[in-house]
Amino acid sequence: MIYLAPFITNQSIAASTISAFFSNQLTFPFYVSTVRVAFALNTQRLLQVRCVVTDSASFASVIPPPIRHVPGIPLFAPQGGQDFIVGDGQEGEIVVPIHRSFPRGFRISVEGWNLDAGAAHTLDTRVDIADLTQEK
């Protein structure tokens, strides 16, 4: 397998807003090795990040909580039960090992829910993927 350019998001999410960002459709079987999420200092659990593999390419950002999800296979749920992660107030990166393979035809979606009513937060993620049909 050959690792491809990662799917990266670095987008500002306005206060009290939910946003989702989608990769292009992957036309080959693929492997997700890790998801890296960087949180700014003092995020204080106010930015929830969810990552899914989906066949959808749309998201209604006006859906009220708690029904906020892009449909698909959540990548964080097998890591501890919750299908999202949050920062703890410290600046830094959380690396989540995924190690899962998927068939062709799906997209990767990264969803951010900014629970902070007073400030925007940056959704800064990197999803490392490999093409399972290619050999080094």
Image (tube, grey):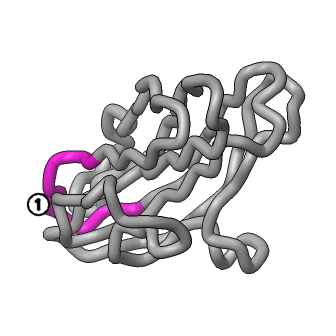
Q: Is residue 89 magenta?
A: no
The number of callouts visible is 1
Q: Is residue 29 magenta?
A: yes
Viewer-proximal residue among 26 and 59: 59
Is 37 on the left-hand or right-hand side of 13? right
Give the residue at x 70% y 73%: 82
Q: Position of residue 14 (x, y in %)?
A: 47, 29
Query: Can residue 1 be seen in this snapshot?
Result: no
Looking at the picture, tell me which residue is in the foreground, 129 or 44.
44
Residue 76 percent location from the top left of the image: 62, 66
Residue under the image location 42 percent in, 69 percent down: 69
State whether residue 47 is above or below residue 54: above
Which contiguous range is marked in magenta? 22-31
**Amino acid residing under circle 1:** Thr
Q: Quadrant of residue 63?
A: bottom left
Disc 1 crowd rating (10 Å Cα; few below 14, some 14-19, many 20+) is few
Q: Is residue 120 above or below residue 110?
A: above
Mark 1 lies on residue: 27
**Quarter-wise, where is residue 116 in the image?**
top right
Q: Is 109 situated left or right of 79 in this image?
A: left
